[in-house]
Amino acid sequence: MISLVFIFVTLGLLGGFLVLTDYEARRGVRVGAAYRERLDHQVERVEFILEHVNLGAFLREEVHHLVARVSHDVAHFSLQSVRATERLLTRAVMHLRSKHSVDATAPRENAREFVKTLSDFKGGLKATHPEISDIK
């Protein structure tokens, strides 16, 4: 059934073509001349390209350009990600350092006692262990 539809459509198009060419021959005018002229020009262009262009080499070069562009974009995105991470870590380190420096400027009374105790301990060590001089 479907093949009959295709046959009738084909015969209808052939009959329409014959009627149109007969009409144009009798009147001496092309129907839809501007549209058909553009279509003829485009068909000639496609025909020229198919005849003169090596499609294998063209496709190979286009794929090469596509792969190069995609790899460039991936590398660029990776670099932006690394830089964003670097900025984030730099801010975190700066924040941590600034907190630590605030703690370092706090009063150091306990540290003073520790230094005093350490000095006393060293003095005690010197008193119990005499210095050894170099014998020559």
Image (spheres, rainbow, N blue to C red):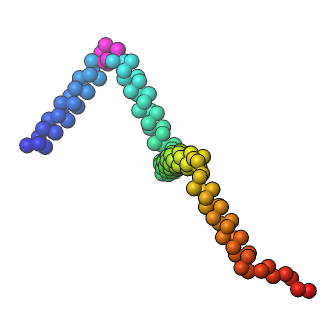
**Which quadrant of the figure has residue 125?**
bottom right
The residue lying toward the viewer, choosing from 89 and 78, is: 89
Residue 11 at x, y = what percent? 18, 34
Horizontal arrangement in the rendering, residue 112 relative to residue 123 (left or right): left
Examine the rendering and report whether any part of residue 80 can be seen. no
Q: Please tell me whether residue 72 belongs to the stretch shown in magenta.
A: no
Image location (x, y in percent) of residue 126: 74, 75
- Is 4 left, or right, of 61 in this rendering? left
Residue farthest right in this picture: 136
Q: Which stretch is magenta?
A: 24-31
Q: Residue at x 27, y 18 (%)?
A: 23
Residue 94, x across and y down, in percent: 56, 46
Is there any visible trace of residue 134 in the rendered image?
yes
- The quadrant of the rendering that contains the N terminus is top left
Q: Nearer the viewer, residue 126 or 43?
A: 126
Can residue 26 be found in the magenta stretch?
yes
In-image side of 53 versus 121 (left or right): left
Q: Nearer the viewer, residue 23 or 119?
A: 119
Q: Is residue 126 above or below residue 38?
A: below
Q: Residue at x 68, y 65 (%)?
A: 119
- Whole-percent x, y for residue 69 in the image: 51, 46
Residue at point 46%, 33% (across, down): 45
Q: How many marks?
A: 0
Say above or below: 68 vs 115: above
The answer to which quarter of the image holds residue 46 is top left
Direction bottom: furthest residue:
136
Q: Seen in the image, is 110 located left or right of residue 31?
A: right
Q: Quadrant of the C terminus?
A: bottom right
Above or below residue 43? Residue 52 is: below
Residue 27 in the image: above or below residue 131 = above
